[in-house]
Amino acid sequence: MNQTKALPEGTAPAPGIAGAISTINDVARLAGVSIKTVSRVMNDEPNVREETRAKVKQAADVLHYRPNLLARSLAGARSFLLGLLYHNPVPTYIMQMHHGVVKRCRESNYHLLAEPQDLTSGEVEKSIANLLSTIRLDGVILTPPLCDMAVVLQTVEAANVPYVRIAPFLYPGRTATVRMDEARAAYEMTQYLLNMGHRDIGFVMGHPEHGGTHLRYKGFMSAMRDAGVEPRPEWIKQGYFSFESGVDVGNAFFADGQARPTAIFSSNDDMAFGMMSVAQRLGIRIPDDLSIVGFDDTPGCELIWPHLTTIRQPVTDMAFAAADILLERNNADEDAPPFSSIVRELPFTLIERDSVRKL
Amino acid sequence: MNQTKALPEGTAPAPGIAGAISTINDVARLAGVSIKTVSRVMNDEPNVREETRAKVKQAADVLHYRPNLLARSLAGARSFLLGLLYHNPVPTYIMQMHHGVVKRCRESNYHLLAEPQDLTSGEVEKSIANLLSTIRLDGVILTPPLCDMAVVLQTVEAANVPYVRIAPFLYPGRTATVRMDEARAAYEMTQYLLNMGHRDIGFVMGHPEHGGTHLRYKGFMSAMRDAGVEPRPEWIKQGYFSFESGVDVGNAFFADGQARPTAIFSSNDDMAFGMMSVAQRLGIRIPDDLSIVGFDDTPGCELIWPHLTTIRQPVTDMAFAAADILLERNNADEDAPPFSSIVRELPFTLIERDSVRKL
DNA sequence: TATTTATTTGACAGCGTTGTCAGATATCAA
DNA sequence: TTGATATCTGACAACGCTGTCAAATAAATA
C-alpha cells in the first residue's frame, strides 16, 4: 500500500534538532538518491519516477529541508527575488502597493526587496544599477514617477531585468504595464461635478513629473470642453501632490477679494486635505460654500470632515497584477506572449461622499 | 606622484558595456592580482599593501565591479540581508518602521526583506522557520505583537539569527531591545488630562495581545491613583487598535441615557478616530462636550477635526536604532557587549492639539 | 529475442564569492 | 650578512545548488 516505506534506516543524520538546517546532501543521502534527483523533485521537474519522487519528498519532509535560496540563485537562473522601486509620493499608496506585491510573492515562495529611491540626489541611475548588479532580481516593479524616467528604464533594461511599470505615462509599449484609465476617471469626476450643477470649477494639478498629473488634467479638460464649459485659467493651479502644496494652493484660491470657483477638483486627496484645512481656518464651509473632490481614496478621506468624494484607485489589485505578470513570466514556457505587449487595465470607482453640494 | 599608474594594458576585457556585469575574476585579471586580493580590498580587510589596494580599487572602478551579494552570502558568513517581520497593526506604523530600517540598510549596503506575518493562520512559526532556513538573514527586527510571542522568539532563536525587538512587553532581557517608555507616556497623558481639570476619564484599551496595551493601561491607572482619582470600571473599555473597534467603543460610551466621562484616553489614534466619527454622528461636540486624546501621532491626527492631542512615538528613530544595533553587531569585533543586554530607550513627546477642553 | 527509443538517474563542472593555509616578500634584530 | 618575525599574496577548497551530458534502465518496436 504505502509506496514510500523503503527508506534506508540508519543513514539518517540526527533529525530535526530545531534550527539544524539540512542541505540537499542530507536529503539525498537519506533518500538514497543523488542530489540531482532531489533537486529535480524540489523543482517539480519531470522525469522522476513517482516512487522516487515520493521517497525524496518524504526524506525532505523528515529533515525539514528547505532549499537554500542563495545557492539556488547562484547556480540557477532564478533568484526568487522581486524588487519594488519607488519614490515615496503618497505613503499609503506605496504601502498598499508593497502589501499587494508581498502577498503574491508569499504565495509563490518569492521574496520582495522594497527599495526607495532618492530622486533629489541625482543618483537614481547609480543606485539602481548598483542594486541590479549586486543582486540578480527576477523582476522589478516601477511605480510613478520612476516608471516615466528614461534613465531608470534604461538602467533596468541594461541590466536585462524584466520589469513592469505601474501607471506609466511616457514610452507606451516599452514593457509590461499595469494601469488604470486615469484620464477617464478624471473625466467622469468632472462630469459628476458638472451634473451636480457646478460650472465654476477649479483644478489642482499634481507634481509635473508624475504621469498621472497630465492624464488627470487631460480628463478634466476634456470633460469641461465636452460640456461646453470653458475652464478659467486662473482657477487651474499647480500643486505637488503633498498636503503642504494643498495648503499653498488653498491660500491662493481663497485669497481675499477673489472670485472663487464653486467646486475644486484636486488631483489627489492629500492636496484636497490641505485645501480643506485652509478652508476650515478661513471659515469657508465645505460643501456649503465650496465643493471639493480628490483622487486616490486614501484612508484619510473617511477621517476628514466632510468625508471626501474621490476616485478609488485599485492599488492592491494593481500590485497583484504587476506581481502576477512577473511571476508568471518566470514560470513561462518560452512560448508566452511578448512581455512588452502585456497591458492590464484595472477599473476605478468614483466614491461619492459628502464633500460636494448640489447646486 | 600617482601611485596607481601601473595597470597592465591590453589585458582588460571590453570595459563597461552597459549592463555587462563583471566578476571578481575580471577585476583580478585587470589589476594583475589574485581574486583573493580583490576580495580583501572589497571587504576592507587588512594586510594589503596600499599600492596594491589602490590598483585593485581602480580596476574595480573601471569595470564598475560590484560583488555579487548572493555569492558572497553563500561563501561567507554574512548575507547583507535584514528582515522586518510584522503583523500589520497600524499601517502607518509599519510604513515608518520600514522606511527607517531601509534607510539605514541603504547606507550600509544592506537590503531589507519585509515579511508580513499572518497571525490568523496559526502558521507563523512555520512561516518564519521557513524564511530563516531559506535565506540566512543577518538579523531580523520584530515588531509588536510578534515580539511578544513565545513561538516567534523560539523560532528565531532556533535559527540562530540575531534579532532585536521593538517595544516588547514580555520576556525582558531576552535579546536586544528598542523601546519607548509607554507606561510613562500614558502616565503623563493622563496627568495632562487631570491638569486640564478632568476627573471623569474613560480609557480605551488596545488589542490584548499587544504589549503596549498593558503598558499604556498601567500608566493610565497609576496616574489616576497617584492623583487620588478612582477610575470607573465601566469607563474602561476594550478595543483592538482598529478604527472599527473605536466605532464600537464609541457606540458603547455614547449609548443613550448613560453617564459619560468628560474625557476619554484612547490607547491609540485610530480608535480615537473611530470614536470621533461616532461622536460627530451623534452630535457630541469635541472638545466642547467631550475631550479625546490618542496615542501614536499618526498622520490622521492633523487631518481630523479637531486635531487630535496625542503621544508621538519616535517610530523612525526606533527603526534607526534597531537597524543600527543589527548592523553594528555584524561589524562588531567580537568583544562587543553581550547582544541581549542592549536596550535603547527613545523619548516620546506629548503633542498638544485641539481635542481637549480645559474644564 | 534483439534493437531501437523513451525515460530515469547520477557524475561532474560550474555559479562568484570567502575562508584556510601555506608560500613569498619585506622588515627588523643581532 | 643571517636568521627570525611580521606582512603580504595566492592556491585551492568550500558554500549549496542547478545545468549539462552521458550512462543506466525501462518500454516499445521489429
Image (cartoon, coloured by chain):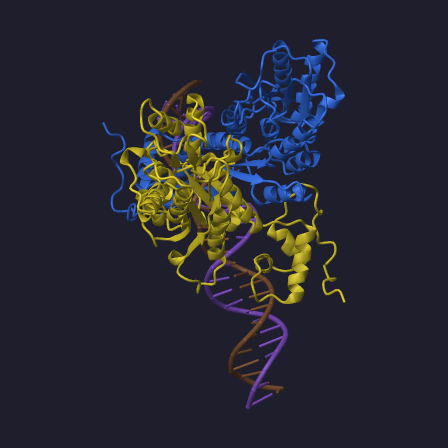
Chain colours: A blue, B yellow, C purple, D brown
Q: Is A248 on the left-hand or right-hand side of A74?
A: right
The residue most toward the left is A1
Instruction: Indicate left or right for B99 with B49 as reference.
Output: left
Side of B211 where A96 appears, left or right: right
Closest to the observer: A301 or A117? Answer: A301
Question: Which residue shows up at 62% across the image and 20% down it?
Answer: A182
Q: Position of residue A121 (x, y in %)?
A: 67, 45
Residue B60 shows up from this direction: yes
Residue depicted at 63% across the width and 10% down the height: A197
Q: Quadrant of residue B249?
A: top left
Q: Residue at x 34, y 39 (%)?
A: B125
x, y percentage for residue B304? 51, 30
The tally of labels here is: 0
Residue A19 appears in the rendering: no
Position of residue B269 measured from the top left corner of the image (x, y, whole percent): 44, 35
Quarter of the rendering containing residue B122: top left
Quarter holding the N terminus of chain B is bottom right
Which residue occupies 63% across, 12% down?
A191
Tell me if residue B250 comes above or below residue B48 in the rendering: above
Quadrant of the image containing the C terminus of chain B: top left
* Depicted A1 relative to depicted B202: above or below: above
Q: Nearer the viewer, residue A102 or A218?
A: A218
Q: Residue B94 in the image: x percent, y percent? A: 47, 39
